[in-house]
Image (tube, grey):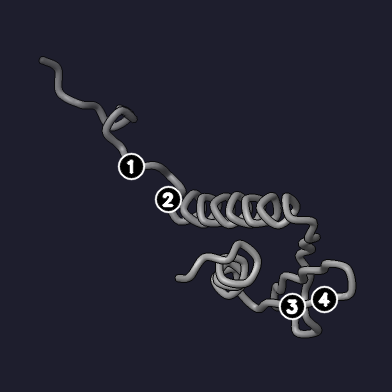
Amino acid sequence: MRAPSVFDTRHAPPADTAGQAAEQIAAEQRKRTSTIQARLALRGYVLVESHTERGDAEWIVSFQSLCKAFASLDELEAWLLTRVEGRRA
């Protein structure tokens, strides 16, 4: 068995773990947003991601004359489950 060299990358940790973790979180949020958007679209609702004056993300749902803004995906998903899909959380 040979000793690992200084340049052996098989056992080395990834170089940019913080950047990769941030990208993974962003990808999971995009997937979650897309899933919620599809669930709403099946019922005739439109979901748009927007930003407030301070730059915070917000999600706006519209359906006929209804227009409702949500500050977080958790809040939006809870509303979707209870008000749109009729499930009780």
User: How many other residues sit within 10 Å of disc 1, few (<14), some (14-19) or many (≥20)?
Assistant: few
SS at circle 3: strand
Q: CA distance from mark 4 to mark 1?
A: 47 Å
Tell me what residue is drawn at x 75 percent, y 84 percent.
54
Disc number lying in front (2 or 4): 4
Q: CA distance from mark 3 to mark 4?
A: 7 Å
Q: Are marks 3 and 4 in contact (CB under 8 Å)?
A: yes
Q: Are marks 1 and 2 in contact (CB under 8 Å)?
A: yes
Q: Are marks 3 and 2 in contact (CB under 8 Å)?
A: no
Q: Amino acid at mark 4?
A: Cys
**Looking at the rendering, which quadrant does residue 89 occupy?**
bottom left
Q: Amino acid at mark 1?
A: Pro
Tell me what residue is drawn at x 81 percent, y 84 percent.
53
In the rendered image, the vertical position of residue 20 relative to residue 1, given as above or below: below
Q: Which residue position is annotated with label 2?
A: 17
Q: Amino acid at mark 2?
A: Thr
Tell me the tag on residue 67. 4
Q: Which residue position is annotated with label 1?
A: 13
